[in-house]
Image: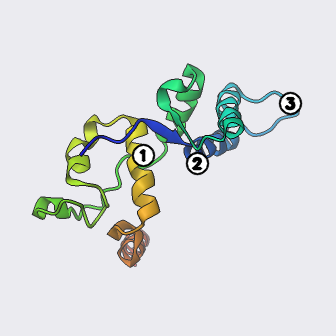
């Protein structure tokens, strides 16, 4: 299987903007914080050109740094520690990644990882997105509270 393209979806740019809006709230000064300014410029160009994705190499260094800061705040892997690829499945029932994606995950760039995250989230068929995931979160909360 080919590696995912290194493109960033507009929803990731939006998420990074919201991340930075929370970190650099609005002040009386109308100027945006530099990371927000860089991301806003990227976002505006995407909207103007009617593109829903942008090659990660097309981002300015400032926009990429701001995006990577947001990316670092997200989970790295969709793994839920129930890997059916280890049992011979081509696609993991737990996280939704292909065998190749699971095997090569550490070598993927952040943009490639986000492309996989986007695909599996849109598909929504992996166990991480169903009732199993809800029960696992509930068990974690109960364990943390001592219940």
Q: Marks 2 and 3, Cα distance to the nearest angstrom?
A: 25 Å
The residue located at (54%, 39%) in the rendering is 70
User: Left or right of 2: which side holds 21?
Assistant: right
x%, y% of residue 77? 34, 50
Q: Which residue is mark 2?
A: 11
The residue located at (65%, 37%) in the rendering is 46
SS assignment at label 3: loop
The residue located at (69%, 29%) in the rendering is 41
Q: Which residue is mark 1?
A: 115
Residue closest to the far front:
49
* Mark positioned earlier in the residue sequence (2 or 3): 2
Q: Is residue 94 above or below residue 98?
A: below
Disc 2 to disc 1: CB gap under 8 Å: no
Q: Nearer the viewer, mark 3 or mark 1?
A: 1
The residue located at (21%, 62%) in the rendering is 83
Q: Which residue is mark 3?
A: 30
Q: Quadrant of the C terminus?
A: bottom left
Disc 3 to disc 1: CB gap under 8 Å: no
x%, y% of residue 58? 53, 25
* Mark positioned earlier in the residue sequence (2 or 1): 2
Q: Marks 3 and 1, Cα distance to the nearest angstrom?
A: 34 Å
Tell me the tag on residue 105.
none
Q: Marks 2 and 1, Cα distance to the nearest angstrom?
A: 11 Å
Q: Which image quarter: residue 119?
A: bottom left
Q: Is residue 22 above or below residue 131?
A: above
């Amino acid at each position: 299987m080919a590696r995912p393209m290194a493109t960033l979806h507009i929803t990731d740019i939006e998420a990074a903007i919201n991340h930075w809006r929370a970190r650099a709230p609005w002040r009386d000064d109308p100027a945006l914080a530099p990371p927000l300014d860089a991301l806003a410029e990227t976002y505006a160009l995407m909207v103007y050109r009617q593109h829903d994705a942008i090659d990660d190499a097309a981002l300015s260094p400032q926009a990429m740094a701001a995006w990577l800061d947001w990316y670092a705040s997200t989970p790295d892997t969709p793994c839920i520690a129930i890997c059916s690829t280890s049992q011979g499945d081509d696609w993991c029932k737990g996280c939704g990644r292909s065998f190749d994606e699971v095997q090569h995950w550490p070598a993927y760039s952040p943009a490639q990882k986000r492309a996989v995250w986007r695909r599996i989230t849109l598909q929504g068929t992996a166990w991480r997105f169903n009732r199993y995931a809800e029960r696992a979160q509930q068990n974690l909360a109960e364990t943390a509270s001592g219940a």
